[in-house]
Amino acid sequence: MNERLIYRLSCPFTNQVHYVGKSIEGMIRPLSHLSKSHSDKINEWVGELKQLGHAPTVEVCEYVPMEVDIDERERYWITKYLNKGNVLLNIQSTHPLTIIPDLEAKLNDGDDFIRTLSTFIKERRKQLGYNQVEFADRAGVGLRWLRDVEQCVKGKNYSVNHILYVLSMFGCTLDIKKIEV
């Protein structure tokens, strides 16, 4: 019988936890994230670490006996790390703060909206004293994505969720209201 466990993936530089998962296959599932994850966010993060010659640290949080609900234990660890200020890449632990039907179009139509947002993100990041590498790691977004946003690169699709993750680092959200004329 394989071991049931809760595991975490951490940044090898900052020791920040960026993912908490469960496995009923011992270390097979945790180690699979190092080559191909089920999550695009994790794949991007691991890919950027690989470019630097590193990989996430994979550690066991706890071994879970058969009589204990493994999903409940996973939620416990996710909550624990969120409460410690870690920004997790877990799909189930991230909730969009505000969803506006036309927000994707506003982010990607090349108007002043993305330039304003871009300037805001760059200035706030600098005010907090983070370089781009540190901030991307803490926010749980890819470095390449952050650089594109801050440089207002044209023709990119800027994900609403990524924008919301970054804004949440500043304690902000997006609230776009349609103004009737």
Image (cartoon, rainbow, N blue to C red):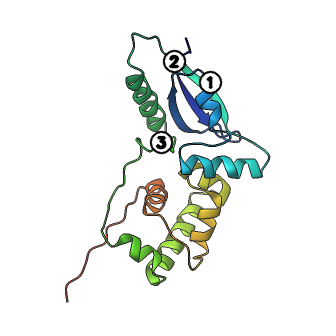
Gap in Å between the C-alphas at discs 1 and 2? Answer: 9 Å
- Is 105 above or below relative to 138? below
Describe residue 51's horizontal placement relative to residue 105 as left or right.
Answer: right
Placement of the N terminus among the 4 image quadrants: top right
What's the residue type where badge 2 is placed?
A: Arg
| Residues packed near mark 1 inside 10 Å, few (<14), some (14 to 19) or many (20 plus) | some
- Quadrant of image for the C terminus: bottom left
Q: Can you name the residue that lies furthest to the right here?
A: 53
Residue at horizontal 30%, vertical 69%? 101
Q: Nearer the viewer, residue 130 or 139?
A: 139
Q: Residue at x 42, y 21 (%)?
A: 70
| Circle 3 or circle 2, nearest the eye | 2
The location of residue 60, given as percent across then percent down, is 59, 23
Q: Which residue is mark 3?
A: 90
Indicate which disc, 1 or 3, sits on the residue closer to the N terminus. 1
Mark 1 lies on residue: 27
Circle 2 SS class: loop
Q: Nearer the viewer, mark 1 or mark 3?
A: 1
Q: Residues within 10 Å of mark 2 (few under 14, many from 20)?
A: some
Q: Is residue 176 above or below residue 13?
A: below
Q: Amino acid at mark 1?
A: Met
Nearer-N-terminus badge (3/2): 2
Residue bearing mark 2: 4
